[in-house]
Image: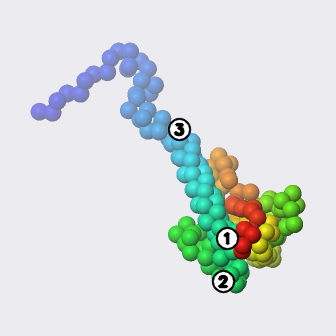
């Protein structure tokens, strides 16, 4: 014979619907889950952007050393060869076709531009800027800037890391240095 279900107490019977807590966990989860998931997505997206930025900084420092020491100049490396050198260090995390590399020389550090450029886009949303490539000669001041449009998405609750009009985030790393005298 099946076991008899326990009879609800007189107090619980009087409260009726409000005393039934069998679905309380599901309701609480439904209230807590969306903000929790939004926070989790935001944390992961922020981590990826900062990790990509740090990777780009490391790559720019390593690639700039080739210009600083005169290896690029002595090998007469073209813009595409230098871009391939940079790309070989980031193939796992970045799409090499979307890297933007700008190498310019300046007469003094105070006139060097290391800031974020203003990007211009065509109707298809592609960057139309023209990037310079001048690794300079011995003793010249050089600025290397490498930029990448990192795809981000607007998360729940309005959280987004986008800083471009097309909804992406421009991450950039730069190095400013004076070429070694013997380069």
Mark 2, secondary structure of its residue: loop
What distance separates the C-alpha of mark 3 from that of mark 2? 63 Å
Along the viewing direction, whichever of 33 and 130 lies nearer the viewer: 130
Would residue 137 be visible to someone looking at this image? yes
Along the viewing direction, whichever of 132 and 109 lies nearer the viewer: 109
Q: Nearer the viewer, mark 3 or mark 2?
A: 2
Question: What residue would you read off at disc 1?
Answer: 69
| Horizontal and vertical percent position of residue 30 | 50, 41
How many residues crowd mark 2 within 10 Å: few (<14), some (14–19), many (20+)?
few
| Horizontal and vertical percent position of residue 146 | 70, 67
Give whichever of discs 3 and 2 has the lower sequence position: 3
| Horizontal and vertical percent position of residue 57 | 64, 60
Asked if labels 1 and 2 touch by Cβ distance under 8 angstroms, the answer is no
Q: State whether residue 20 is above or below residue 10.
A: below
Q: Which residue is depicted at the point 87% across and 66% down?
A: 107
What distance separates the C-alpha of mark 1 from that of mark 3? 59 Å
| Horizontal and vertical percent position of residue 59 | 61, 65
């Amino acid at each position: 014979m099946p076991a008899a279900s326990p009879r609800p107490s007189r107090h619980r019977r009087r409260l009726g619907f409000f005393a039934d807590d069998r679905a309380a966990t599901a309701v609480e989860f439904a209230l807590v889950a969306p903000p929790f998931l939004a926070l989790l997505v935001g944390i992961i997206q922020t981590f990826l952007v900062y990790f990509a930025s740090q990777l780009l900084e490391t790559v720019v420092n390593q690639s700039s050393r080739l210009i600083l020491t005169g290896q690029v100049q002595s090998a007469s490396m073209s813009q595409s060869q230098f871009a391939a050198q940079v790309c070989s260090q980031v193939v796992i995390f970045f799409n090499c076709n979307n890297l933007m590399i700008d190498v310019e020389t300046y007469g003094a550090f105070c006139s060097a531009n290391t800031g974020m450029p203003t990007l211009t886009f065509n109707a298809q949303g592609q960057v139309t800027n023209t990037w310079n490539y001048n690794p300079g000669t011995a003793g010249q001041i050089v600025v290397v800037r490498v930029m990448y449009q990192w795809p981000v998405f607007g998360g729940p609750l309005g959280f987004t890391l986008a800083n471009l009009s097309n909804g992406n985030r421009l991450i950039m790393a730069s190095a400013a240095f004076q070429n070694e005298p013997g380069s």
